[in-house]
Amino acid sequence: MTPLPGGRLVPPTRNTQAKLDRLARDEVRANETPQHSVAAILALGANLGNRAETLDAAVRDLSDVPGILEVTLSPVVDSVAVKLDGPDPDAPGYLNAVARVRTTLSPRDLLAAGAEIERAHGRERLERWGDRTLDIDIITYGDLEIETPTLTIPHPRAVERDFVLGPWWALDPDAILPGVGPVAELLRALQTTPIETERP
Ligand SMILES: Nc1ncnc2c1ncn2[C@@H]1O[C@H](COP(=O)(O)OP(=O)(O)OP(=O)(O)O)[C@@H](O)[C@H]1O
Ligand SMILES: Nc1nc2c(c(=O)[nH]1)N=C(CO)CN2
């Protein structure tokens, strides 16, 4: 409740209360360890250093995490770096891919595992959407939909990223972005030229 001058408390409006309830529910879900393994999609990106080697190593590192049971990598694509003001052909280009994992980790532990692997590969956070040796984002976790201050699933910008949707589609042409729709349709909506990947 919000204190007023004089110390009197006012109850939150119904709208605010609904938001607080949602946040509390999503915080619980973010920390929930699943009873059975869950399929999750992780987006991998690298545009500094030996990008291909880093992606290979990241897959090995993911496989070594207790609680990550299977890791399947999509085809890897080259993509122009997207900066906050749009694509930047002068910035180092990215290698992007997605990894499908099966995991018994909670969403938050999976996020922490990815962050630890990023750190081990020298990831620095100097600017938003800045160049990086390795980025690992959670795109989906089963069909979970949550929004917390530090973890939103599905990843809110996946829908606009051909460098995520393209490799994901190549790995699984029937993939669905929970709460949004088929990846194939989202890719078409982006009206990009077909991503240069071959079905595995
Ligand atoms: N689904 C998610 N996957 C990864 N990080 C997430 C997700 N949702 C929220 N975050 C938060 O975003 C923070 C910033 O992540 P990061 O530095 O990787 O962003 P970015 O890769 O530069 O940008 P973007 O989030 O647009 O991909 C993380 O510390 C994490 O708490
Ligand atoms: N091409 C490309 N551009 C990006 C990427 C990325 O993975 N690939 N990731 C970003 C922040 O996550 C910002 N811009």
Image (cartoon, grey):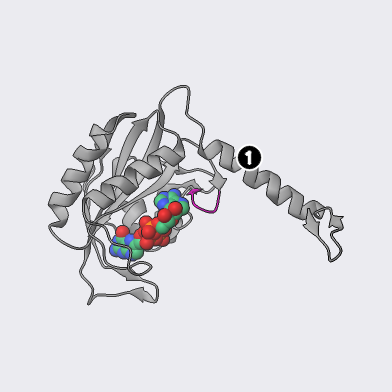
**Overall secondary structure of the magenta section:** loop
Nearest the viewer among 15 and 169 is 15
Residue 151 included in the magenta stretch of the image:
yes
Three-letter amino acid code at the position of disc 1: Arg
The x and y percentages for residue 41 are 37, 42
Q: Which element is circle 1 on?
A: helix
Horizontal side of 82 relative to 57 (left or right) equals right
84 versus 164 height, above or below: below
Q: Quadrant of ligand 1?
A: bottom left
Give the quadrant of residue 174: top left
Q: Residue at label 1?
A: 25
Which residue is at the far top?
A: 35
120 versus 109 height, above or below: below
Residue at 14% across, 61% down? 49
Q: Classify 10 Å Cα crowding around label 1: few (below 14), some (14-19), many (20 and above).
A: some
Q: Quadrant of the C terminus?
A: top left
Nearest the viewer among 191 and 93 is 93
The x and y percentages for residue 16 are 75, 54
Horizontal side of 29 relative to 64 (left or right) equals right
Give the quadrant of residue 162: bottom left
Please say whether residue 168 is visible from this viewpoint: no
Give the quadrant of residue 96: bottom left
Horizontal side of 198 relative to 26 (left or right) equals left
